[in-house]
Image (spheres, rainbow, N blue to C red):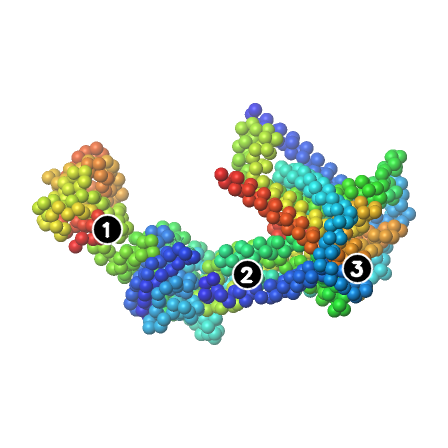
Amino acid sequence: MVRWQRGLWLFFLPSFGLLAVVLLWPLGYAIYLSFFDYYLGSDVRSFVGLGNYADLLTEGRLWNSMWTTILIAFGSVALEFIVGFALALALYRLHQSAKVFSVLLFLPHIVTPVVAALFLKWMLASNWGFIDATLLTFDIVPPDWLGDPIWAKISVILADAWVFTPLVMMVLYAALQGLDTSVVEAAQIDGANNWRVLRHIIVPALIPAIIFTISVRLMDVFRFFDIIYVLTGGGPGTATETITIYTYQLGFRMLEVGKASALGVITLIVVASLLLTINRVLNSIYRGGDQ
Amino acid sequence: MSVASIQRKRRRETYLVFIALCAFTFVNLMPLIWAVLTSLKDPKDAFTIPPTIIFEPTLKYHWEVWFENDFVRYLKNSLIISAGTVCISIPAGSLAAYALSRIPRRNAGPILSALFTIRMFPHMLLAIPFFVMGTFLDLIDSYLLLILALVAINQPFTIWLMHGFFLEIPRDLDEAAAIDGCSSWQAFRIVILPLARPGMTVAALFSLLLSYNEFLFALVLTGTNTKTLPVAIASFGGEDITAWSLSAAGAIGIMLPIVLVMLALQRHLVRGLTAGAVKG
Amino acid sequence: MASLTIQHATKSFGGLEVLHGVDIQIADGEFVVLVGPSGCGKSTLLRLIAGLEDITQGEILIGDREVSHLHPKDRDIAMVFQSYALYPHMTVEENMGFSLRMRDVNLSERKDKVRASAEILGLTNLLGRYPRQLSGGQRQRVAMGRAIVRDPKVFLFDEPLSNLDAKLRVQMRSEIRELHKKLGTTIVYVTHDQIEAMTMADTIVVMRDGYVEQIGSPLDLYDRPANIFVGSFIGSPAMNMLEGRIGGDRQSFVSNRGTQIAFGAPVSPEADRKVILGIRPEDIGVSETGTPAMVRQVEPTGADLHVNLDLDGDGFTALFHERLPLEEGQNMGLKVLADQAHFFDPDSGKRIE
Ligand SMILES: Nc1ncnc2c1ncn2[C@@H]1O[C@H](COP(=O)(O)OP(=O)(O)OP(=O)(O)O)[C@@H](O)[C@H]1O
Ligand SMILES: [Mg+2]
């Protein structure tokens, strides 16, 4: 760095000092804990090496929660993407009134997640929830949205989609607004139908934004906690128990903090490899584009 | 096809899109509308089939939840914790972001990627050691511990966001300031900071929102004294079905300030989102 | 006020060397212009002097003081940026007084100095405005005002006029000259516009690819360019270059395509030497018996006649001050005087004396 600007390194101190204390240190401590059999209530800890990891990986519950996470991830991301893209296109079409719509449509995302989950709970609650009450009016017997293992999964996916579709919509809408309108208009004048304009002009231009949203959302799913916690608590049984919920149960309900830490580390590894894979795919796509 | 007929067709399509969007928005906001209605209902109107749309609204439960159920106290906790987070996170983050925007790109790149990676950490992995250490240090149910945890998840995003704002301030100004006699710190404080104020406000509002909404850390690190609004409403409305009106009133109350902040932030929303605001 | 000495200044970015040992000696009060094509390292050299970039090797002295490794604020220089770099949140007065404020000059003295400088630059009734409320020319003036209030040892200008329109540029050119006369401070001024260089400089430094090609007064450079590059860079339209050899009588030149040019007197290179002949368009005369050429294009500018010629396939430009009755496609005879011909060595590109 240029000599007269060397003092700038000092500017990093507060922030990086903070990060070291509140982020790296706890992280290191968690990794350390993951090698111990440690029940917080008893205050005895014994070193078990990779024992926690071995236990977890041979347990059915971990794999169950892993599959649930993956199912919810793909279900909700697919739904969010399809609906979000459609909404972004619709907003793009409207121009003037788009602003009002974008604010209204964005509300579910900005509301406190716990509150959003409660809103949905009051919709889905059996009998007196809005949906049930409406269906029962017409003598339709509704399924148990949150109590049936399959419906509960679907409800959780819908809830995730309700909260995160606006994000996908906004990012894609912003990318659409960056498009060169003259190209789109020229294609329309040339008689290209909407579908063709979409496929051959709009989608290719949006690829970076699309990849960004999908990858960020995929990784977020591994942190998805508050909505499931409020909506189903992981139930019925373990039907909607994701890795995050399982870690919570282990660490804060059963107080098995050693094992919970190990599960946290496993999650980190899964997320990191996901990140690397996405990076690699991204790179190969971009390199492919250059050729 | 003539241009006129294309335009006619387009106008018709746009009209259809408008109608469809209105319908979707209405259905999409139904949970929210329903919650607002519920919060204004007496239980006799809340538990009916078919659902009551027309009833005599009452603000009784709004009053009750805030003033007879301690929500004012939770609000105070939420505000102290959010403000504390912002007061630590924004100054520290701004300094780092400024330096990051001024050092050579080849040095800044890896730091930015590292920060981006940190953003992807599962929060659970952080919550456990915080909880264990908090237990030992007897810091559970203290403002400080939760503030520190929120700073940890806030800092990377704050730096990212502010970095973008600082990049927009030309480096010529730093150089002119250096020649005019400023040290790096003086250049930052006297020349750059006043120009970065709008960006800092945006970052502060986003941080505020993030801390106000945060649930996991608040759930495990607070207790009766420092409980924040999300934790309170989750335990309140989660279980008791007869308290629907009451908890709906609480939920709506929690939501209102957010809507205001969001309106203030509208223009910067996309930028904040891509930096990871709102949901950490 | 002080002299400025640059000794063997070398600058590398990463592994790439962009200045290769530049030596320049600037006298106290001199107005020096650095010119050269884009990317030749002018700004880099200026920023080395200012201290905005670290020097890789070599020394910079202001007066007798070595400043090579000092912070910009400790070098006692002032700089006018191409973008002006005015502080947007400060008024004109605050902008101009900023460097004094940073040097703890008290308020009343600051006000006096700012007022005095504003007077010189005609900024007195703009002092309360913010930069965004000023026109381009006014901003330019404020940038200069900011530089002069402090009375530094050296002024540095990096293409200060390139954001102005053509008319304003001409006006500011003479204003900066005036200012220099009034203040007498040493100035290093960067431009890539050779007219700006010719009209403003006491001394011009011509640079190319990180090397100094020639240092001299404007007329020096015009009359006796040290090499082909300087010859073709200084002067507009550019000098004509023809490759060939000197005739056996030392009074003529034969181009590789066979064109004969007679000078009517002996020239400096020895007989039969391979050379590159340089002739300025404005040095070409007309003579019935001279070298035959074909008129390709005639462009009257009003004051001059700009003529593109064809010499056995070589393109050639001539500039006549008379309005000759020339038509495209016609043949004419050219004349070049011995003392107006420049000769360069084809291998080294250096001037042959
Ligand atoms: N920070 C830098 N990092 C790497 N290379 C640089 C840097 N700054 C300048 N260069 C290189 O140094 C060379 C000289 O650049 P410089 O800006 O001094 O040119 P210049 O003569 O001022 O050109 P112009 O007339 O276009 O302003 C160029 O090749 C440029 O690419
Ligand atoms: Mg330059």
> Disc 2 and disc 3: Cα gap in Å?
42 Å
Q: Which residue lies furthest to the left in this view?
A: C249
The verdict on a common chain for dots 1 and 3 is: no
- Local packing at callout 3 (Cα closer than 10 Å; few below 14, some 14-19, many 20+) is some
> How many residues crowd mark 2 within 10 Å: few (<14), some (14–19), many (20+)?
many
Q: Which of marks 2 and 1 is in front?
A: 1
Q: How many labels does the image show?
A: 3
Q: How far across and down, in percent of the image, does residue B79 sit?
A: 73, 62
Vertical placement of A172 versus C182: above or below? above
> Element under label 2?
helix
Hey, which residue is sitting farthest top in the picture?
B1
Mark 2 vs mark 3, foreground winner is 3
C8 horizontally vs B142: left or right = left
Q: Position of residue B277 (x, y in %)?
A: 65, 53
SS state under label 3: loop
**Residue B203 visible somewhere in the drawing:** yes
Residue C248: x %, y % from top left: 9, 45
**Which residue is at the front of the view, C292 or A250?**
A250
The residue drawn where x is 71% and y is 59% is A49
Residue on which disc 3 sits: A255
Q: Is residue B198 among what the camera can see?
A: no
- Could you tell me how far apart the alpha carbons at marks 2 and 1 are, in whole angstroms? 49 Å
Q: What residue would you read off at disc 2? A: B98
Q: Is the residue under label 3 in contact with that under label 2 (CB below 8 Å)?
A: no
The residue nearer to you, when weighing B188 against C187, is B188
Q: Please give left or right for residue C136 compared with residue A133 in the image.
A: left
Q: Residue type at mark 2?
A: Tyr
Q: What residue type is labelled 3?
A: Leu
